[in-house]
């Protein structure tokens, strides 16, 4: 084999090795970024879930509060009517 062919093979092999190493490093960095972004997304999702649960609890209690207000309004109206008669 000629000297030029050997030099070309060595150069090609080293170039291929460099590409493989840089691709592995880029993939590792991308994986780290994806994991970090996923952790942030998970945290935000947990916070939103907590807020939705609080809202649902509030929404369940509102009809009860509204009924209590109606009852109090009727009682006040009854007291006002009794006070007007006296």
Image: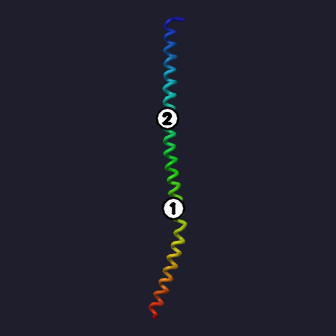
- Report the residue at 50% width, 36% height from top: 32
Give the answer, above or below, for where 47 lies relative to 60: above
Name the quarter where the N terminus is drawn.
Answer: top right
Name the quarter where the C terminus is drawn.
Answer: bottom left
* Residue at the bottom extreme, as displayed: 86
- Report the residue at 49% width, 50% height from top: 44
Give the structural element (helix, strand or loop) at label 2.
helix
Q: How many marks?
A: 2
The x, y position of residue 27, in whole percent, is 51, 31
The x, y position of residue 40, in whole percent, is 49, 45
Give the answer, above or below, for where 80 lies relative to 39: below
What crowding class fits label 2: few (fewer than 14 Cα within 10 Å), some (14-19), or many (20 or more)? few
Contact check, label 1 and label 2, Cβ < 8 Å: no
Give the answer, above or below, for where 51 lies relative to 65: above
Here the colouring is rainbow
Q: Which of marks 1 and 2 is nearer the N terminus?
A: 2
Residue holding disc 1: 55
Give the structural element (helix, strand or loop) at label 1.
helix
Q: How far apart are marks 1 and 2 (CA)?
A: 37 Å
Give the answer, above or below, for where 61 lies relative to 81: above
The x, y position of residue 46, in whole percent, is 52, 51
What crowding class fits label 1: few (fewer than 14 Cα within 10 Å), some (14-19), or many (20 or more)? few
The x, y position of residue 77, in whole percent, is 48, 84
Residue holding disc 2: 30
Identify the mark at residue 23; answer none if there is no mark: none
- Report the residue at 50% width, 76% height from top: 69
- Report the residue at 52% width, 47% height from top: 42
């Amino acid at each position: 084999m000629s000297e030029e062919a050997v030099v070309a093979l060595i150069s090609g092999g080293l170039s291929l090795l460099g590409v493989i190493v840089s691709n592995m490093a880029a993939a590792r960095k991308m994986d780290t970024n994806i994991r970090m972004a996923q952790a942030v997304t998970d945290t935000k999702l947990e916070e939103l879930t907590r807020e939705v649960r609080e809202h649902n609890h509030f929404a369940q209690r509102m009809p009860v509060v509204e009924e209590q207000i109606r009852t109090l309004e009727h009682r006040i109206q009854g007291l006002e009517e009794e006070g007007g008669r006296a």
